[in-house]
Amino acid sequence: MQVGHLRQRYLWGPAVDQILAEEDVDGGTPELVKWILTDHLNTVRDIARYDSETQSTTVVNHLVYDAYGNVTAETNAAVESLFLFTARPFDPDTGLQNNLNRWYDPSVGRWLSEDPAQADINLCRYVANNPVIYVDPTGLWKGDTHRQLTRQSFLTAFPDYAEVLGDACAAYILEVMTQSNLGQDAGSMPWSEATQPGQQNYRHYCRDQQQSVAQANTAYAQYLNTELNTFNTALAGSSCHAGLQALGRLTHSWQDYYGHAVTLAGRDNAWGTGIATGNPDAPGSGVKAPTFYYRFGYPAGEHGLSEPGDRDPNSALRRSEAIDFVAGKIKPMLDRWLEKCRCNCPPQGSNYVTV
C-alpha cells in the first residue's frame, strides 16, 4: 500500500455520528459506494449498493447483533465496514470500539476504563446495562445522572437529614422525588406518543425545529410555573405525595437547563467561558435551548445523540451549578412540605429505611 494513499471516503449527515455512505476509493467505481442503513441506536443494520446500470439498490450485507454490539450473524461477511454498533469505529485488530473518551469491549459489555466524569454507580458498566435503549457515543454517558444530581442536591439542602428528618422520612422524600424526576424521560424514543413527557421539549429546556429561542424560553418558564402551582395546590389540599411528585418533576427540568443549554451559535462549550449562562429562573443572554428532533430514527439538531452538557469541556461545572441551584430551590419548598406533611413521613405501612 502506498504511503498516504486514500483508501476510504465517508459521507456524513448533520447529526452526531450520522454516517450515510462510504466509498472504496481504491476501486473508483460507483459500485463500490456503500450506503448505510441504521436503526434507532444508530447501529448499522444494512449495507446497500446502487447499480447504475440497472438503476437498482441491493442490500449486500445484513447484520444481526446481540444487545451489547457483538455481530452474531451477517449475510455477507466480505462486505465490511469500520462503523457498526452505534456507528462508532471499531479497531479490527482488537475488536474494541473507540468512543472518544474510552474504549468499549462488546465481548464483555463494559468499558476498559472508568467513567472520567465519575457520574455512575458502576463506573465501567455500559449505559447502565440497558443497551437496547441507550447509547454512549462519547464514553461519558451518565445512566444515573438525574438520580445522582437529585441525591446530591438533597444532601446539600439537608446535610443533617438524619437528625432533621429521620432516615425513613428522608428516604421517602428522596425516592418519590427521584422516581418522579426520572419519569420526565418516559416516552423519549422516536416512536413514542407526542403526549409522553419525553416528547415535550418544554419540559427539558429544548426547543422544536420551528420554535424561536424566545418562544422556547417562554414555554419552559410556563411549564415550571405550572409545576410550581401543582406543588402549591397539592400542599393546600394536603396531597403530600402529589406535592413531592411535582417537586421531583421540577428537579428534572431545572437540571436539564444545565445539561442542555448551548451557546447562541449552537455550541456546547457554554460554561466556564465568560458567557452569560444564567439559571432556570432567568436564562442567560448568552445561551439558548437547543433544537431537538428525530432524523432517521435518532436525535438530531443542536442537541444530538449525547447531552450538550456531556460534550462541554466544562461539564463538571454544569453539574455543580445544577446541584447548587436545585438544592437552593428544594430547601424552602421541602421546609413548607414538612410543615404540612411531617406527621405522615413516611406514610404508614411503607418500608423506607435510609437514603
Image: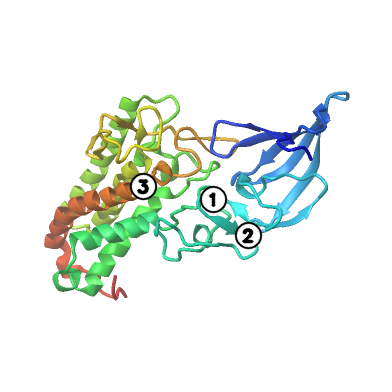
Observer-nearest residue: 314 or 246?
A: 314
Q: Earlier in the sequence, mark 1 or mark 2?
A: 2
Q: Write down the residue under mark 2.
A: 106
Q: What SS does tag 2 mark? A: loop
Tell me if residue 177 can be seen: no
Q: Earlier in the sequence, mark 2 or mark 3?
A: 2
Position of residue 217 in the picture relative to residue 233 (left or right):
right
Tell me if residue 270 can be seen: yes
- Where in the figure is residue 260, as x and y percent of width and height? 37, 40
Residue 315 marker: 3
Please count the marks in the image.
3
Q: Report the amino acid beneath label 1.
A: Val
- Where in the figure is residue 229, as x and y percent of width and height? 21, 44
Q: Report the amino acid beneath label 3.
A: Ser
Q: Write down the residue under mark 1.
A: 135
Q: CA distance from mark 2 to mark 3?
A: 27 Å
Which residue is pictured at 36% across the width and 24% down the height? 212
Quadrant showing the N terminus: top right
Q: What SS does tag 1 mark? A: loop
> Residue extending furthest left?
339
Quadrant showing the C terminus: bottom left
Which residue is pictured at 75% across the width and 40% down the height? 47
